[in-house]
Amino acid sequence: MDSFRFVHAADLHIDSPFAGVGDTDSRVATRLREATYEAFQNLVDLCITRNADFLVIAGDVYDGADRSVRAQLRFRNGLVKLAEKGIQTFVVHGNHDPLDGWQSSISWPEGVHIFGATPEWIKFEKNGEVVAAVQGMSYPKREVTDNLAVQFSPPESGNLFAIGLLHANVGANSAHPNYAPCTVEDLSESGIDYWALGHVHTRQTLKRADPVIAYPGNIQGRHPNETGARGALVVDVDPSGASRSEFVALDVVRWERAEVDISNLDTIDSLDSAIRQATDNLSVQAQDRDVVCRLVLVGRGPLHEQLAAGGAVEDLLDAVRGVWSGAGSPWVWVERLVDSTRPEIDIESRAKQDDFLGATLKRALLSSIESDEIERLTEVVSDVYSGRRNALEKPDDEQVSAWAEEARWYLAELLEQGR
């Protein structure tokens, strides 16, 4: 068997709207609207420059079921460019772009195979020899809760490198909807050599061999929780059938999160400088990419009280945005500045003192490690949420714990000031 190379990508989310992000800066909004298109073009260029034999895309090509004509045309044009270089493409659709969604009458170039709702094997030839086979299936509708992995059939020949192309939640990842749920064991028993997965936006390899089970993550971050490099996997398969992969970043706008500690800062001027330095560092780390970031002010110190003054945090945010407003690309745009600082009170020591504040901190408030109290509070808060006419999503233990800790500090500060 000849060696060959393929690129594994997923979750392109072409035409993602980035609603609400960058509304206050037209430059940022425009850049974000084009980000998924540019990241896809980077994917096409990667396949060409690395001389890939084929590309596999594991679902969510588009951001919505009713994909725009613009998104479909740009996707088609990218695949045409690959076809002209002799690079084939294998595609499945996921929960964001199921087969029952609207699509225009666009013809796909030769060498592109889009899988239907039933698994099928498609063979790949190189130099006149069949060296690999790809089996995939698309979502017929948005909400697919069946285990699709068990519907895949074993490879037709043991001499071919077998690739399974699937959009699925393996291992019940709680960060994503539990569509097409399956387990690593389900995939391992299939006889397939490489599972090219999509759906989970964070890059991870669930199994490194026999078979390889991998998520490449999405090619462009879409919100503050999708930080860090985003891209695709370049996979090389040698004549023995062994494979190795390399991650290549493709994103054009990098989402990041950073902390700025006030503990050793005494003035707003020094804090302003520290915030600017943080954005400078993020710009360097992003390697010529634009950056959208969330900065969190942390630590204890005298600036905590000044930050609590009306409009202080907003003014600092305006100031750092102003620094980058006239800058050409690459730029940094601070999406949000969060004040998580604390007063200079040593709350643990104060809780040990034999006075009213110490007794309050020990008895009326709870520690973050008291899980039984957190569980009790979660039940109470959940009852309040579910009792609303338009019920909100119930908070989890982590959120309730954060609220309780915030209340603990707030009360400690009030009581200490009132002494």
Image: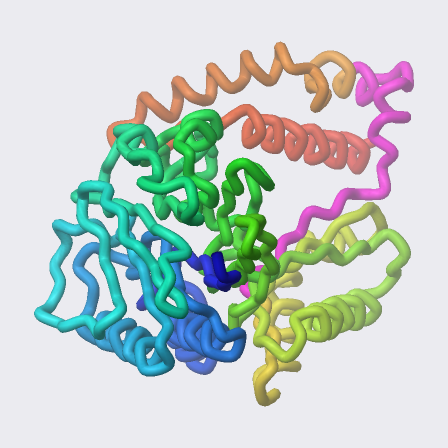
Q: Position of residue 198 (x, y in %)?
A: 40, 48
Q: Position of residue 14 (x, y in %)?
A: 33, 66
Q: Position of residue 300 (x, y in %)?
A: 82, 46
- The reply, left or right, for residue 321 in relation to residue 55 is right
Of 20 and 358, which appears nearest the observer? 20
Q: Is residue 221 visible?
A: no
Question: Residue 23 is drawn in which quadrant?
Answer: bottom left
Q: Is residue 350 magenta?
A: yes
Q: Residue at x 60, y 79 (%)?
A: 331
Question: Residue 257 is drawn in which quadrant?
Answer: bottom right
- The reply, left or right, for residue 42 in relation to residue 296 is left
Residues in magenta, as a range: 335-359
Of 262 and 282, which appears nearest the observer? 282
- The reply, left or right, for residue 88 in relation to residue 256 is left
Question: Residue 376 is drawn in which quadrant?
Answer: top right
- The reply, left or right, for residue 182 in relation to residue 3 is left
Of 119 and 296, which appears nearest the observer? 119
Q: Is residue 204 magenta?
A: no
Q: Position of residue 234 (x, y in %)?
A: 54, 62
* Quadrant placement of the C terminus: top right
